[in-house]
Amino acid sequence: MYFRNAGLTIDKTYYSIHTIIRYFMINSITLHPEIKTNKNMESRKEKAAELKRCGTHNCTQAVLCTYYDYTGLDEDTIKHIGNGFAAGMGNMEGTCGAIIGAGIVLGLTTKDKAKSLKGTRYIMEKFQERNGATQCKLLKGIGTGKPLRECPLCVADASQFLEEILDNNGKI
C-alpha cells in the first residue's frame, strides 16, 4: 500500500491522491494533462482566499503562494516577492494586490511579455466588471464607507480569472 517514485514513499491510508498530485506538481514532474482539472483549480481559488482570510499572507502573497509551482520559484521566495504589494502598493492608492499577484504569476508562467500583458488586462477587466473597481481603497470602501468587496473575495476573484488563463496554457 505504498506509492514509490523519485524517493517518495506515501502510505495511501494517510494521504489522499491530491497529496500525491501536489507532490508531482511541486517537483515539476510532468503529469498527464487530464490531472489538472477545473475541480483541482477550484480548490486553489479557495486556498488562496483562505491564506488571506487567516492573516498569514497579504493579497498578493496569497495568490503568489497558491500558484508558486507554476512559476519555477519556491514558496518562500515568491512570498517575499509579494511583501511590498500589500494594501494597494502600501498606501491603498494602487491596484488590488490580488491582481498584482495574478500578473506576476502570469509573467513567470508564460515568460512572454505580450501574453502577460494581455492576460493581466483580461484579469483587470473581469475583476472591474465583477467588483466595480480595481483600486484597493475603493474596494475597501475607504472614503465612501461602503466596501465593494472583502479582501479574501478579491483574492478568490483574481485567482479565478488567473485560472481561466492557466487552463488555456496562457491564452485568453
Image (tube, rainbow, N blue to C red):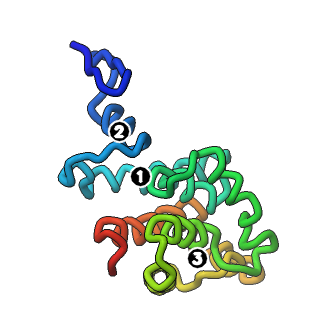
Q: Residue at x 68, y 59 (%)?
A: 82
> SS of the residue at dot 2?
helix
The answer to whether residue 73 is left or right of residue 94 is: left
Q: From the image, tell me which residue sits under label 2.
A: 24
Name the amino acid, label 1.
Arg
Q: Amino acid at mark 3?
A: Leu
Residue for badge 1: 44
Question: Which quarter of the figure is the N terminus placed in?
Answer: top left
Question: What residue do we see at 43% from left, 42% from top?
Answer: 26
Could you tell me residue 117's position as x and y percent?
A: 51, 84
Q: Position of residue 85 (x, y in %)?
A: 72, 66
> Dot 1, how many residues are within 10 Å of its Cα: few (below 14), some (14-19), or many (20+)?
some
* Residue sitting farthest toward the top: 1
What residue is disc 3 on? 148
Is residue 68 shown above or below 127? above
User: Residue 60 at what x, y percent from top left?
Assistant: 62, 62
Q: Nearer the viewer, residue 145 or 54?
A: 54
* Depicted 23 relative to depicted 106: above or below: above
Q: Nearer the viewer, mark 2 or mark 1?
A: 2
Residues packed near mark 2 inside 10 Å, few (<14), some (14 to 19) or many (20 plus): some
In the rendered structure, which amino acid carries the disc numbered 2?
A: Phe
